[in-house]
Image (spheres, rainbow, N blue to C red):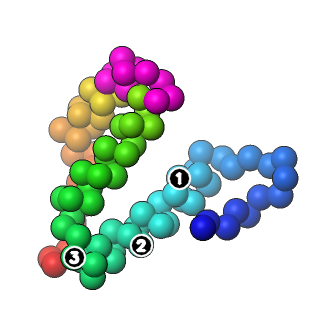
Amino acid sequence: MLSSPLTQGETLTNEEQRKLLLRPLQHLLGRRGDRGIEFDTLGHHVVSAALFALVAKYGAETAAEFIDDLAKSVRNDEFSFQRKPN
């Protein structure tokens, strides 16, 4: 479970939320090979979970518009990174 740096009544900024959520994901990505989980399998399930959450919160049409924008970002190399060999 994640520990929160907040006291009751405080809210996290978008940047604080992003950092708090990315830490365990980075850890999971780093350890996935130790557990026998392929990188693409993990990625598929993480993206699927995010899509279920987006559709549940915003509806299918808004989620689809987000995905269209996301596809453009992927094509523009906004998510490229140097992948380390396994």
Mark 2 residue crowding within 10 angstroms, few (<14) / some (14–19) / many (20+)? few
Q: CA distance from mark 1 to mark 3?
A: 27 Å
Q: What residue did someone put label 3 on?
A: 36
Image height check: is 70 above or below 11? Answer: above
The picture places residue 65, in percent across and down from the top left corner, at 33, 22
Q: What residue did someone put label 2 on?
A: 27
Could you tell me if residue 78 is visible in this image?
yes
Q: CA distance from mark 3 to mark 2?
A: 15 Å
Q: For marks 2 and 1, give the one nearer the viewer.
A: 2
Q: What residue did someone put label 1 on?
A: 18
Q: Quadrant of the N terminus?
A: bottom right
Q: For marks 3 and 2, give the one nearer the viewer.
A: 3
**Along the horizontal axis of the image, is 55 left or right of 9?**
left
The picture places residue 71, in percent across and down from the top left corner, at 23, 34
Could you tell me if residue 69 is visible in this image?
no
Q: Toward which corner of the image does residue 77 lie, by quadrant?
A: top left
What residue type is disc 1 on? Arg
Range shown magenta = 56-65
3 or 2: tag closer to the N-terminus: 2
1 or 3: tag closer to the N-terminus: 1
Front one among 15 and 62 = 62
What residue type is disc 3 on? Gly
Residue at far top of view:
61
